[in-house]
Amino acid sequence: MTSVPALSQRTTMNLADLFFQKLDSFLDAGPGPGSFGPLVYVQAEPSQFLLAATNAGGTAVPLVRWHDLLPRKALARAMHKRGYSEADLDAIVVVLSRLALVFEVDRRQRTNKDYFIFFYVLQLLALKQRPIEGGDDVRSKALYFLLFELSIDHEVRARLRLSGNRMMFATDELVEVDFSQVVDEVYGSLGIERAKEHALLSCMHGFHRAVVAFVAAPGDPELRLSFDDRNADLIDSDRFVDALARDPGRVFEALAAAVDRHQSNDRLFVSNMILMNYSFHVLKDRPEDVLNLRRYLGNDGLFGEVLRALIHRRMFVDKAQFAAIDTGQDLSDLVVDSGLFYNITHSELIV
C-alpha cells in the first residue's frame, strides 16, 4: 500500500464527550444533544439524532452518509492504484459509515442493542488503557461484536483486528494495513485540499481518524465512568478480570446485587454491565463456572434469580446451556422475550 502523508490541518475532536453524552441521554432523557466543536447532531426522526458535519452553506451532513460525497468511480480507480480491490473499498466505506452510529442518540426507546454497544465500547476504552492477559485477542473480539451490533456483516468484521494501539485492516491481497493509514489514503485519493467541500471533507477525515483512535489508541485515563455505586469499577473489563482473580467473592456479591428490584437508572446500568462482563469473560467459554457462583451464594433462590437475569441478558449464554448443567434450577417455565430488556432502565429489572 502507498503511504499518504497526513493532512497539515486536523480537526480536534473529543469523541469521549460525545459518547458520554449518548450515555447520559440513555440514562436520563434530558435536553437533546448539542454541538461539539465542528460536529453537530441533526434530528433524523423525532427523538433520533445522528452525528453530522456541516458544509460551507451550513447544511449538516450525517456522518453515516459521508460516502454520498464520494466520486465513487474515481475513488475506486485511485484506491486500486494504491493496491485496494473493489471489495476492500466496499468494506472500508461500510466500516467508516457505521462507526458513526456509535454516537447516535436515539431516545425513542432504550433497546438491547444500546446495551451491547455501550458494553463493547466501554470494554475497548478500558482495555486500551490497561491491557489484560491476551488483551489484543479480547479487544479484537470486542471490536468484532461491536461491529456486529452496528449491522456489519461477518466478511467485513473479520477483516479488522486490534494490535497494540492500532486497528489493522486485512485486504484481499492478504496484506494488513493500519486502518488510520487506510483512512488517510481514502481522503488523499479524494484530493480534498482542492475540493469544493474542503472544510466538510476535512472535518469528516478528522472524525474518521479520531474514531479509529477512540477505539484503538490509549488516551486520557479519565475516560473511565464514575457512578455513585460501590460496584461501578467492575464495569471496566480490566478491573472486573482483576477482581475475579483476586477476590471472586466481590464479583459474586456484585452479581447478587444486580437482581435487586429497587435500583436507580444508573445502578441498573451498572448491574447490566456486570452481568455482561461475567458472561463475556467467564461464561462464554466456561458456562459450567456458574456453579462457582452457586456455591458462593449458598442460596438457591438468589442464585436462580441471577441465573435468570443472565439468560434474559442474552449474552453468549442461554437457557439450553444452563439446562445442560446441574444448576439445581428448573428453567422449564422460563420464556425469553426479545423485548424484555428494551426499556429496562425505565422499568423493574427482569429476572
Image (tube, helix red, strand yellow):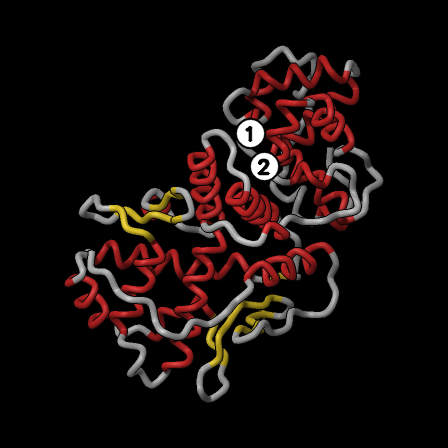
| Foreground pick, 37 / 273 | 37
Q: Quadrant of residue 182?
A: bottom left
Q: Secondary structure at mark 2?
A: helix
- Residue 104 is situated, as x and y percent measured from the top left of the image, at 56, 62
Q: Name the amino acid, label 1.
A: His
- Residue at the extreme right: 262
- Residue at the extreme bottom: 57
Q: Quadrant of residue 278?
A: top right
- Residue 7 is situated, as x and y percent measured from the top left of the image, at 34, 71
Label 1 vs label 2, nearer the camera: 2
Cβ atoms at labels 1 and 2 below 8 Å apart:
yes
| Foreground pick, 179 / 217 | 217
- Seen in the picture, residue 35 relative to 344 is either above or below; the reply is below
Q: Secondary structure at mark 1?
A: helix
Q: Quadrant of the C terminus?
A: top right
- Residue 91 is situated, as x and y percent measured from the top left of the image, at 31, 54
